[in-house]
Image (spheres, rainbow, N blue to C red):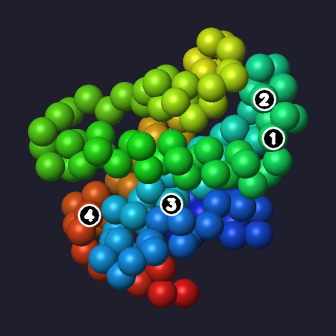
Amino acid sequence: MPANGRNGNAAECPVKADWFSMPYDEKTKMSWFHYEYACLLYGQIVNSRKKTVLRWCRQLSRDQIAEFCAYYSKRMQPCMYDIVEGHSTTLSCSVGYVRDYCHGNSRQENSDLTELAQHAMSDILDDCSECPELCLSEPGAYCEFFDR
């Protein structure tokens, strides 16, 4: 998987890799997957043409949006582990995760952000099917990406 997903580069995305890999034992391929997901979600949000999302973005800085994306991605980790370990076949992005982080949002903002999160997840899973890194097949394997 290329750094910062297929829709961006490190200069454009304010999501920080070290938000996902602080201790040595978190420098895993699954952590890289979630970093990439956060970057892709960031791109989906800031490039959205939905009025509610545009209005939501105007209230926040780039860093605040990035922090939300990192938070949301990390909240998705248990769901992704259930999929990877074969405990579930359903991947659903939760509006509750948005609501938990953004207490002042309207229902429509929460719904639209959750829809973008689902689109970002679908996109990254499509990318993963073509990627040789095998992040989802080897989620606990050490990832050199975080050594850069």
User: Is residue 77 visible in the rendered structure shown here?
Assistant: yes
Distance of label 1 from label 2 (alpha carbons): 7 Å
| Residue for badge 3 | 35
Question: Where 97 falls versus 129 (above or below)?
Answer: above
Circle 4 packing at 10 Å, graded few (<14), some (14-19), many (20+), is: some
Q: Residue at x 45, y 74 (%)?
A: 22
Q: Amino acid at mark 3?
A: Tyr
Mark 3 vs mark 4, CA separation in Å: 13 Å
Which image quarter holds the C terminus?
A: bottom right
Please name the residue that numbered disc 2 is placed on.
56
Q: Residue at x 54, y 65 (%)?
A: 19
Please state the horizontal and vertical placement of residue 120, each as a whole percent of the image: 53, 40
Q: Residue 139 got which mark?
A: 4
Kind of element beneath mark 2 = helix
Q: CA distance from mark 4 to mark 2?
A: 33 Å
Residue at image mark 1: 60
Left or right: where does residue 22 sit relative to residue 82? right
- Which of the two discs, 4 and 1, sits closer to the camera? 1
